[in-house]
Image (cartoon, rainbow, N blue to C red):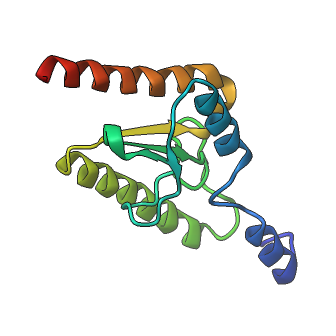
Amino acid sequence: MDNLTPEDRRKNMQNIRSTGTKLEERISKALWKRGVRFRKNVKSLPGKPDLSIKKYKLVVFLDSCFFHGCPEHYTVPKTNADYWVPKIDRNRRRDQEINDLYREMGWRVMRFWEHEAKKSLDDVVDSIVKTIEEHKAAKQRKD
């Protein structure tokens, strides 16, 4: 049984942000300082990626350990498991479908778990910058 009243649970769930999270802001600021220009939460792109760079055909998703079912941290909730288990499974399937769709379109997809970004923000930012630099180098070799 849920230990919150339905009204309190509703307020709690309303406060969970899908865009403009602190983690998203920290990564955005770090990338901006490194000279990387991007768009955030572009609605016209599949899955509304957290960050996208059309010039380099790159999308970045910052996945919550709970809502996306992190293999390291996700545990089945003790309350309302009949709701959450299928929900998280749907999220995982949708994430894979989005990855496949971008790859079919020739885009690169980068996904980071929230715990990875919290543990080592610099590693996440370095990885994104490295991917961009690799794309630039490949394009120069073509030209």
In the rendered image, the residue lying farthest to the left is: 142
Residue lying at 33% horizontally and 55% vertically, measured from the top left: 98
* Camera-nearest residue between 13 and 89: 13
The percent coordinates of residue 139 (x first, y second) are: 21, 25
92 sits left or right of 87 in the view:
left
Residue 94 horizontal/vertical position (percent): 37, 60
Of 136 and 19, the residue lying toward us:
136
Which residue is located at x 52 percent, y 20 percent? 126
Q: Is residue 30 left or right of residue 69?
A: right
Q: Residue shown at 21%/20% (left/top)?
A: 140
* Residue 83, x across and y down, in percent: 57, 72
Q: Position of residue 104 (x, y in %)?
A: 18, 50
Q: Quadrant of residue 11?
A: bottom right
User: Can you say whether 139 is above or below 12 in the image?
Assistant: above
Seen from the viewer's position, the closer of residues 64 and 83 is 64
Q: Nearer the viewer, residue 66 or 109?
A: 109
Location of residue 92 with respect to 110 vertically, above or below: below
**Apparent side of residue 124 relative to residue 26 in the rendered image (left or right):** left
Quadrant for residue 73, please give it: top right
Horizontal arrangement in the rendering, residue 26 relative to residue 54 (left or right): right
Q: Is residue 67 above or below residue 108?
A: below
